[in-house]
Image (spheres, helix red, strand yellow):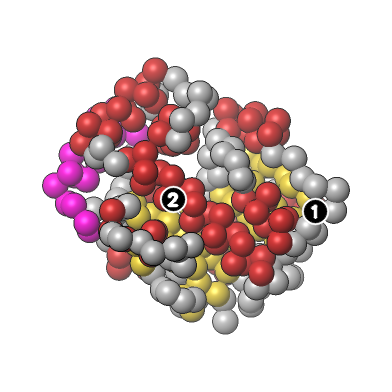
Amino acid sequence: MPNSARMYDYWLGGKDNYAADRQLADLFLQKIPSMREMARANRDFVNRAAHVLAAEGVRQFLDIGTGIPTSPNLHETAQGVAPDAHVVYADNDPVVLAHARALMISNEVGQVAYIDADVRKAEEILANPELQAQLDLERPVALMLIAVMMLIGEEEGPQASVARLREALPSGSYLAITHPTADFDPPVVAEVTDAARASGMTFVPRSKAEVQAFFGDWELIEPGLVPVRAWRPDGPVENPESAWYWAGIAKKP
């Protein structure tokens, strides 16, 4: 069965993917020739977000749906700013976890851990002994949900799962989200959505309002919920809507 993490790996030039992944990934490329650049824009956001959050004083990160490691990884960026940062990666794909354990190595001061977890099972994530050993949930945590909620259908209660995670985090925590959308080209995204579902993969693009709902009553930091390339870019961006993801970070009051 095709898997979104391995499809991303393929789009980013990696080798940790299978024929089923490449077949569906190539179909996406036929419909969206700039898909590789979009995937890269999504990964670039992770590094900008980690840098900003670490600079804001965050020392704990929980990255759910981390995907196959692509350097620089979130912990490398965060620990580059704050060497004592603790990062917990969570994914439910054995291939992702195997590579994470092999490639995601902390520095001597910080900590990196990996747990087998599913974003749909918030209680299991929060009760995980490894997570509890690495993260102090009485202190602010940056919860990273990067291109993962698209894999959860509405019938599986994605809003409730994210709300439970938000509820468990203390004041001063942050939530970072990227999410693919059909807002910028509905017909093409409808085609790839149908193709993904026909291949057995859940893929749910969401509108700006639907993505914003994941933040609940948390306060979006500047520049708000914007196209991923427009979120605090490193330089001028000619066409922010050329990557079809909404991106934002919110802080818990």
- Main SS type for the magenta part? helix
- Which quadrant of the view contains residue 57? bottom right
Q: How crowded is mark 1: few (under 14 residues within 10 Å), some or many (20 or more)?
A: some
For badge 2, the amino acid type reads: Asn
- What residue is shown with label 1? 110
Q: Which type of secondary structure does the marked residue at label 2 adopt?
A: helix
Disc 1 from disc 2: Cα separation: 25 Å
Q: Which type of secondary structure does the marked residue at label 1 adopt?
A: loop
**Residue at x-position 63% and y-position 30%:** 99
**Residue at x-position 30% and y-position 60%:** 238
Say above or below: 132 vs 39.
below
Q: Nearer the viewer, residue 123 or 246?
A: 246
Q: How crowded is mark 2: few (under 14 residues within 10 Å), some or many (20 or more)?
A: many
Q: Are marks 1 and 2 in contact (CB under 8 Å)?
A: no
**Residue at x-position 62% and y-position 67%:** 53
**What's the magenta region?**
183-201
- What residue is shown with label 2? 42
- Tell whether 131 sits left or right of 169: right
- Tell whether 42 sits left or right of 77: left
Say above or below: 171 vs 79.
below
Whether residue 161 is visible here, answered yes or no, is no
